[in-house]
Image: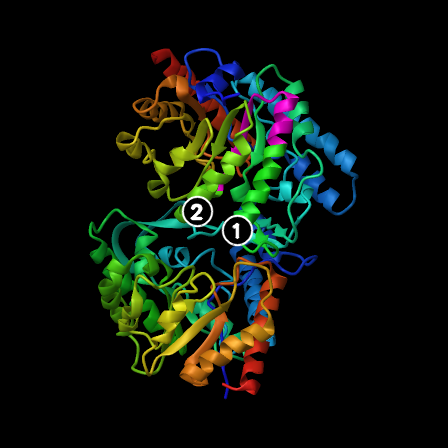
Amino acid sequence: MAITTTVIGSYPKPPDEGRAFVVRQTLHKLERKEATEEDLRGAQDDLARSIVGEQEVAGIDIVTDGHARWDDILTPFARHITGFEIGGLLRWFDNNVYYRRPVCVGDLEWGGPSSVDAWRFAHSVALKPVKAVLPGPITFARLSVDEHYGTHEEFVLAIARVLAQEAFELEAAGARYLQIDEPALLDAPEDLVLAKKALEIITGELKPSATEVTLATYFGDAKRLGEEIYDLPADVFGFDLVAGPENRAIVDALPGGKKVQAGLVDARNTKLEDKDDLARDIVTLAERFGADRVRVAPSSGLEFLPREKARAKLLHLAQAARRAETNGG
Amino acid sequence: MQRQTEGERFMTANAMQGPGLWTTSVGSFPKPDYIKKARSRFARKEISREELLDLERQATKEWIEFQDSIDIDLAVDGEMYRGDMVAFFAEELPGLEIGGLVRSYGNRYYRKPIATGPVGRDHAVTVDWWRYAQSLTDKPVKGMLTGPYTICDWSFNEHYSTRRDLVLDLAKVIRDEALDLERAGAKFIQIDEPAASTRMDELDLVIESMAVVTEPLSAHTITHICYGDFHNAYPKMLDIPVDQIDLEFANSDYSLLEEFSDHPFTKYIGFGVVDVHSHHEETVEEIAEGIRRGLKHIPADRIFVDPDCGLKTRTVEEAKTKLTNIKKAVDVVRAEL
């Protein structure tokens, strides 16, 4: 019985200690006009390739490109959406990481694909399936400023329509795994009905059962959403079991036919989890739901860790999953 | 002896003249190219620590001279010797180790420390630098420390079973450092807590740990807080036991001032009037208008005017222009008082 391992999305960009940090150097050179956009793309291609490779070597079954070309999950999209401008720096949830807040100043319109080329590249260098990642419309809206629509609902639905186009293009390019990230929904239970409407706009663009949709939450627990989170249109539900231990009760209520993406290793602290503890945890989940309904993952994107630590965490996760397969589950 | 009130401590510091709107800086200044080069050469072991120190002293002297030249009221040493505000302390404190690179924003990365054992302190970390900077000017120089909550929040923790345990151990370390600064003569001590507004459910821990640091001090104490959930942190942040809170206003178009209408700001304020993450050079009039907006809520003799945050991410020229314009704007508004 196989247990699928996956990641949430981001991965550290710095190389291992002592190696040249080419992407960073190229960005500096680009600022001084000593490098071209072409040089940057090349450096980012190399980074994405190495990130995909590291995940595969560690034993991850569904990989991402590590968001190798992104600073966060909003701005790469906001930059391609007509109607958005990029604003000042704000803290990314409770992390010592900052993102630039998108500001909506006009009607939002899809201005061409934001993430399709990056997905295609990762797919071309990967042996394993590559998951495409989109920011969820609630999170997008809540972390942006709306100076145009006036109501939260209109703003969210406008974002959803644009993301729906992106999702359609990703599927057309061949993506079979699509993850929609909604960390901000955890603190916005009042948005649950709106989230359903918005996510249906996105998933409505996808061919029935061609693409598996994961709804990912992280950095906290879904206690305030409760089991109603399962009303949202997704095949897989992702929870952070490190920052939100109370998610275990919600995972326990996973409806039949749905899968869980359990964030088991701490993506925000260097302390390495014990493999036996992890394996036991995975066996418990597999016994409860059946191994085919369990995905195991880090608690969130891994870019909060130094590169070596991120890799070590993935290795532990994958080894624990293999150990769980032999020991039961 | 009963602890003095904030006003008494301010009077004891007795350094500020005039009607208020004193000018200062949050802490860091950009490093001139020769420091950046020297730091990488030091990292590659091509120059000695002493050679690097000499250059850092030279750069510190240049920044003190610049602040004197535009008549800044409360000087800072500019932190030429720091990589970043947490790693600098982590390098010197037993129990903390320097970890690998992680991203802060955009193309900016820092080495995030790891608590690997019980945190302690076996020597003063900032006192020599403070003494040196103060020897160069007649203006008071701030003692600059990073707060215990922020050091914890910006470090990995592999040793302590709870964050609170780590924060409270760090608080004792920072308190001892502050006491050494005070013994050396510092009248203004800033304990930066930029992470304080990160988690509302931990604001009590910020308050508890800051009390450990400031309780024995007679200096005027300041904390700098940035990039957070102000609307939820205010007015509770006024319970942080310091005399002055330094906040960024320019970056959010002075929106925090709206909060002050409902809940008056009761401490001395560090009033940030230029955005430190933007190449945009705020004009004297723009800054003056910002100060006037502040004056509607806080009296001049409770206001220190400064940039939103440390200026280290700007170029030397941008930083100097921003500081010069702040000083000019203050002169304009002071004349209107």
The disc at residue B163 is 1
In which image quadrant can residue B197 be found? top left
- What whole-number distance in Å separates the C-alpha atoms at marks 1 and 2? 10 Å
> Residue pushed farthest bottom?
A1
| Nearer to me, A121 or A274 | A274
Q: Residues within 10 Å of mark 2 (few under 14, many from 20)?
A: some
The residue identified by callout 2 is: B202
Q: Is residue A59 visible?
A: no
Which amino acid lies under the numbered mark 2 shown in the image of this protein?
Answer: Glu
Q: Chain of mark 1?
A: B
Which amino acid lies under the numbered mark 1 shown in the image of this protein?
Answer: Arg
Q: x and y percent of residue B2 in the render? A: 50, 22
Q: Locate residue B18 relative to residue A184 in the image: left or right.
A: right
Q: Which residue range is magenta in the image?
A: B177-194
Mark with earlier residue (1, 2): 1
Helix, strand or loop for disc 2: helix
Q: x and y percent of residue A85 in the render? A: 34, 49
